[in-house]
Amino acid sequence: MPDYSLAPEGSHFIDGAYVEDPAGAEITVIFPATGEVIARLHSATAPIVDAAVESAQRAQWIWAEMAPVDRGRVLLRAAELIRARNDALSELETYDTGKPIQETLVADATSGADSLEFFGGLIAADTGQYIPLGGGDFAFTKREPLGVCLGIGAWNYPTQIACWKAAPALAGGNAMVFKPSETTPLCALKIAEIFVEAGAPKGLFNVVQGYGDVGGMLVGHPAIDKVSLTGSVPTGRKVAGAAAGALKHVTMELGGKSPLIVFEDADIESAIGAAMLGNFYSSGQICSNGTRVFVHEAVHDRFVARLKERTESIRIGDPRDPEVQYGPMVTEAQMQIALDYVAIGQSEGAILQTGGARVVPEDAADGFFVSPAVFTAVTDDMRIAREEIFGPVMSVLKFATEDEVVARANATEFGLAAGVFTQDITRAHRVIDALEAGTCWINTYNLTPVQMPFGGIKASGFGRENSAAALDHYTQLKSVYVASGPVESPY
């Protein structure tokens, strides 16, 4: 792997340069596979927050005056740079998150580049609407930037989330201040460097590190015009409430407890593969995971037997090893949460078929590893079937009829994602139409191409990431009426 410095030149990236303020609380960055400290940063102080926002305001004024096609060229150059440095960025992502290098090489920086490329090409075609009104009068619409957008990232996909939020925001003529999770603060700094190198005005994409109090300062800053959060439902409620008080635009991409339904005619091997990807990829730390796997009673036992066999063959170990398929949890605390839920599931009467224990690989003995857990005999009222665990804990639930499984799948406050496996395409569409979820899949799971909107309903959030729909959330619509004759007035 290429040599990549883990410790950045400074904690924050503002106005095109690294900035440090040792007065801020220390942020310790730990490699989850070994427990080693790989960097020490500082949380932002109020002067750092103000400097970042003021720099973003200056850059946004310059950026918004540029032609959309010129803004697009900058994003396209940034995408090219990310792809050229994918190996190095993927290595950093592995150190930051603990995800296997075989995963980060294909799923993290590359998906961020895809987003920048998509919006870089799209923005020049966003030309508004012409509306004929008769008598020579007409109206037209145009999309205008909001101003300075705040992006708040989660720790599971730090590079991807930074790009997913920056791409539509910058394409639309905005600037962005991005606050990564304090757990995985390193990757966004490299993205900020790349934007400057690609030709973006200094300050257009600033990175500010910090804990929850820094997020609060940023959300409440009067010069922040829009807030986009990826995080938990409790955090989302808090951030959305604070933003609503100032009538700021808000996008919330929150958690889930998503259903994956396997009917009796499904391709069982494909359904099992999807269930494993939807529970164990990134060690189960994905918001859209299908953690409630509903399996028809006619194929339940065969499904479980083969699922157990395939799960126990997963290669666990040091995520820097290209052959390793499954890495550690992101922190010791997250590992303990997963282990606690395994104990809760057993205490409630669910049957642990495999996994659910702390693992000590020979090549990563001090890491935060939990073996992939599969529970059966799970009922809808159990906590492991109701609460988001954000860890490798799969609940397999048996069902008998279509109406029954749809009702049970919808009986949750969440509505992020859902999946259906069946060879009956009519049934597939019927069930998908009935499921209360914002992002759905038929005969696959967790694929999120940039061309497709991603987001949830109910407690899982509102607004969308990716696709042309995302531009609607980073711009405001202006309508203009053009008259061709004199004004008629009764006065």
Image: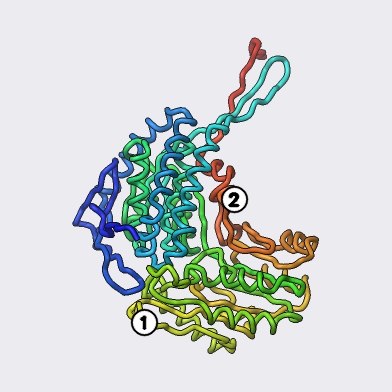
Residue 212 visible in image: no
Question: Residue 2's quadrant in the figure?
Answer: bottom left
The label shown at residue 453 is 2
In this rendering, would 202 be left or right of 106? left
State which tag comes first along the sequence, 2 or 1.
1
Q: Residue at x 46, y 39 (%)?
A: 76
Q: Residue at x 37, y 72 (%)?
A: 331
Pick the residue in front: 89 or 214: 89
Q: Does dot 2 land on a helix, a strand or a loop?
A: loop
**Picture quarter with the C terminus:** top right
Q: Foreground mark, 2 or 1?
A: 1
Residue annotated with mark 1: 362
Residue 356 percent location from the top left of the image = 49, 83
Pick the residue in front: 417 or 458: 417
Q: Residue at x 50, y 75 (%)?
A: 392
Residue 104 percent location from the top left of the image = 44, 61
**Picture quarter with the N terminus:** bottom left
Residue count near mark 2 (Cα–Cα under 10 Å), binned few <14, some 14–19, many ≥20: some
Residue 468 percent location from the top left of the image = 58, 42
The amino acid type, in three-letter code, at marker 2 is Pro
The label shown at residue 421 is none
Residue 453 visible in image: yes
Tell me: residue 463, above or below residue 476.
below
Q: Residue at x 57, y 33 (%)?
A: 126
Question: Residue 268's quadrant in the figure?
Answer: bottom right
Give the alpha-carbon distance from disc 2 to disc 1, as whole Å: 41 Å
In this rendering, would 27 be left or right of 173? left
Residue 81 percent location from the top left of the image = 40, 45
**In the image as oriented, which residue stretches furthest toward the left?**
22
The amino acid type, in three-letter code, at marker 1 is Glu
